[in-house]
Amino acid sequence: MTELNTEHTKKRETFSTGLAVFFATLGSAVGLGNIWKFPYVVGSNGGGAFLFIYFICVIFVGIPVMVCELYIGRKTRSNAVGAFEKLKPKTAWKGIGLMGIITSFLIMFFYSDVSGWVYSYVFKAITGQLSGVTPATANTIFEKTSVGLVSPIVWQGIVFIVVAAILIAGVQNGIERITKSLLPVLFVLIIICDIRAFTLPGVRNGLKFLYYADFTKINGGVILAALGLAFFKLSLGMGTMITYGSYFTDNNNLLHTPIKVAISDVVVSLLAGMAIFPVVFTFKMEPSAGPGLLFTTIPLVFSKIPFGGILLACFFILTSIAATTAMISLVEVPVAYFSEEKNMKRTNAVLLTVIIMFIIGILATLSASSKSLLGYIKIFGFGFFDLFDKLSSNILMPVGGLLTTIFVGYFIRKEDFKNEVMNNGALSNDSKFNLLYIVIRYISPILLVIVFLSSLGIIKF
Ligand code: PFF
């Protein structure tokens, strides 16, 4: 290791307390995935039956992969690429980290676009542009927000300025402070929206859609979508949890944190679903309406009630918080890589990363719908927006997760892994660890391989 690298390792920040670790990790998991993506993916894949498969993916794949990633990060106290290099120097394993960096760019290309829509809805709600909307006007407003040359790109630029400012402030002053103070507020706000949604006439049908499991709707594509969503939701298979794990303190619990984060994350997703589907059914909208679902339903929840405008603004403010806490974890992956492996100053690493993300992200923005300027360009049948999304969620993240479980399960000594997960003997829960180890070695990778083969049509069930 060069002296410069040693210097970086010494100066490395960590999160300060267990609570800070929980909120930062949850801040990465909770994001647009819960509030924007989860409802429409559940909606397009048949509701309750999808949910069941999703839970299985979280338990048998999501949580084990998260433990593996946190282990890799905390053990090495390095960025996603450096971590593999420290554990297995001069091998191809660091390719997993590099793949993670590419994935983080791909996700940010479209995530920053949707975040821009959310930021612009905050502005619209505050300035009263959303008051008294009807299903028809809600659609028109959404189209104006997402299609066009100037407004979506300007809002996307604002998103990057906010993210860059937080990251430049650092791990404790930026990431930790923002996530710890804002996530509890998000939770309260979603509950308020649920209370309102529960007083709508469509509540029964909405909840039935979300929870009633019709297993005839399940096929390989649905399972792949559930797996992809689990990875996207829990920020897995792309180095984020390796990078955040490297900021964990020595006494954080690497087993309980993922379980707590996964449960809280599912709760937030369900709360978001319960706020949205009653509206969909009350106003006879299409549950599988796609990426616009959130933007065309939520304004209706508050359209005709006292203080509706204020509540609506709060809802989008809170969605923008969720989006922002997730984005800082996405952007932190290349930032940590550039600053540690390429010896860049943190500020320069942040600026370089967000500038690249912004420039290429404009492609996603201009192809978000078929009516967008570049909406006609199709690659493998997908526009840029969908291509970046599908490539990352359905391919790169699960492949990254598969390779990570194989790495930890078969190429790391069990004792080393166990010592780190058990905080060098400070925690004693052998039976839990042994169970987890079996899942990591046999269940998670096999499930991942089966899902892939079925999605490629090689096996059918
Ligand atoms: N988990 C975030 C969400 O559900 O919105 C998205 C995300 C964040 C994906 C960070 C990947 C990541 F590394």
Image: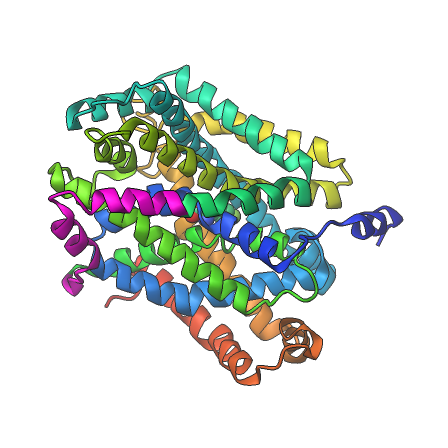
Corner quadrant of residue 224 = bottom left
The x and y percentages for residue 341 are 74, 45
Magenta region:
188-216
Disc tally is 0
**Residue drawn at point x = 28 percent, y = 29 percent:** 307
**Residue drawn at point x = 53 percent, y = 39 percent:** 105
Principal secondary structure, stretch drawn in magenta: helix
Report whether residue 5 is seen.
yes
The x and y percentages for residue 257 are 54, 63
Corner quadrant of residue 155 = top left
Q: Does 410 sit above or below residue 248?
A: below
**In this picture, residue 18 sits left or right of residue 90:** left
The x and y percentages for residue 461 are 23, 68
Q: Is residue 201 magenta?
A: yes
**Residue drawn at point x = 47 percent, y = 34 percent:** 109
Query: Which residue is at the far bottom?
Result: 431
Q: Is residue 454 magenta?
A: no
Q: Does 317 sit above or below residue 48?
A: above
Query: Which residue is at the far right?
Result: 3
